[in-house]
Image: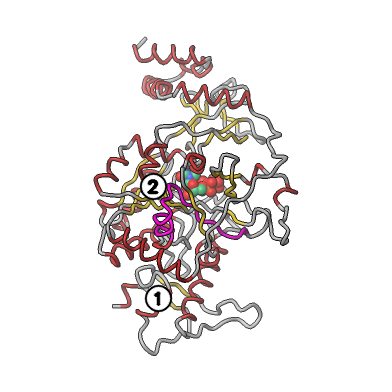
Amino acid sequence: MKKHHKLAQELLTKLGQEHVLRFVDRLDAAQQDALFAQIASLDAHTLSRMRKTLEQRSDTALHDELPEPAPVISLSAAERIAALSRGEELLAAGMVGVVLVAGGQGSRLGFDGPKGVYPVGPLSGASLFEIHARKILALENKYRISIPLYIMTSAANDAATRAFFEEHNYFGRDRANTVFFSQGMWPALTKDGRLILDAPGHIFESPDGHGGLLAALKKHALFEDMRQRGVTTLFYFQVDNPLVNVADPVFLGVHAGNFSEFSIKVCAKRDADEGLGNVVLQESGSRRMLEYSELTVAQKSACDESGRLRYYFGSPAIHVFDRVFMEQQAEQDLPLHVANKKVPYCDEAGRLVQPDTPNACKFEKFIFDVLPRAQRSVSLEFDRADEFSPLKNASGTDSAETCRRDMLLKWARWLEECGIKVPRHDEDGAPAVALEIDPCYALGPEDLMANLPSGFTISGDTLLSAETAG
Ligand code: UTP
């Protein structure tokens, strides 16, 4: 037996997972090598934490006493101007980096390929990645700087993501300022703590959650990269929200002005059932994210004296982090979150079975679990109509249809702010034409006002793009 095979076998014995080798005799040499390499990459510390988490798991988590919602900053016009100028200083000094987490599996959307490739632009068919990248390009042009974009992928979509950027020439940005890195993959366990084979020579694994960001940045030496580029502040967002105001200078300014380590944008929840987390205060005075799943139906819809939802504000995962804080957090474990899932497995004969009901526990880390460790944190209110409409589902709520509707409504408002008449339907007031504004044409109504040619009117579908503007 090869030496590394023997070591892997010893590791499995130590972990009580010898069943992983039950089909080993059927594998050819290459398959055996691959399996033993996968075994060698198992992290005994994490596996033992996973098993402990399962042992201690209880389904009756919920709270009797509800924690206080954390205070939320709503800016006055004057405060907004001050924050904008502070944020612009940070941007102009090249101190801001952007982190895009795009390693998820997008299982609800069911799209074949990385979610960022999804064509969501109402007229251009621009992908989510293109929309995000062009917002960064617009900022780079505006402030005459480079903004490094760090994109977290996973084993399942890393190659396709890189190829997509390459194929589209990095959407006009300098390729040296787009950095891809893969997050970690974790095995799932059966309810009694056993690893699962999804092929005779392969252990089932899936991405380790958006909280895997910290370990991945550390592993790929990207804190070092940030230091070398002079990046002190990181704007963090998720791939699925085409409305996001990437590296919003006002948000950056609020973060810096409050000496915050971890700042969170929050918006009014659509209703009590919307699955957004709530920032709450702990007894120690620190903050934490109260997850939607921690509340009963009654608790979710509880109201305060004014009749407003007690947990009125939700977090759509738009954050600003202090780089040093993140770097410190990467040295510590994050809690494990468990979910019951359907995981394909090999039966006794080695045939693949797709279960009809959850048969396994998947583990993930969540980035917001570093919140209680922040010395200073702020939540900033924003208007969801302007900045939040995620692509989660193939149809219905939070689908491509609702994303496009919300983009259209936003651009119609911008145009109307500039005094342009937008044809609207009588019945529901929705725009009667399709609209699209390329981020490099305008990042907001002020840019639009400056760039629209005089006498501009809208008579049909209208795409305003930097290229055609000439
Ligand atoms: P979601 O929790 O919405 O998951 O991720 P998802 O993978 O996009 O979709 P479903 O739940 O399978 O349908 C929120 C954000 O976090 C990223 C996603 O790519 C998305 O930007 N994410 C999630 C990761 O980067 N890694 C993960 O392991 C999980």
Residue 210 % position (x, y): 47, 42
Q: Which residue is mark 2?
A: 322
Along the line of sight, the residue nearer the viewer: 276 or 27: 276
Along the line of sight, the residue nearer the viewer: 57 or 107: 57
Kindly identify the residue that appears in the image at 48 percent across and 36 percent down.
Answer: 208
Q: Earlier in the sequence, mark 2 or mark 1?
A: 2
Q: Quadrant of the N terminus?
A: top left
Q: Quadrant of the C terminus?
A: bottom left
Kindly identify the residue that appears in the image at 73 percent across and 52 percent down.
Answer: 302
- Tell me if residue 265 is in the magenta stretch: yes
Between marks 2 and 1 in the image, the one whose residue lies nearer the viewer: 2
Along the line of sight, the residue nearer the viewer: 256 or 458: 256
The residue under label 1 is which amino acid type? Glu
Which residue, as the protein is rendered here, is positioned at the far front? 284
Residue 176 % position (x, y): 25, 51
Residue 105 % position (x, y): 50, 44
Which residue, as the protein is rendered here, is positioned at the far bottom? 455
Q: Which residue is mark 1?
A: 446
Kindly identify the residue that appears in the image at 57 percent across and 54 percent down.
Answer: 71
- Tell me if residue 231 is in the magenta stretch: no
Packing grade of label 1 (10 A; few <14, some 14-19, many >=20) is few
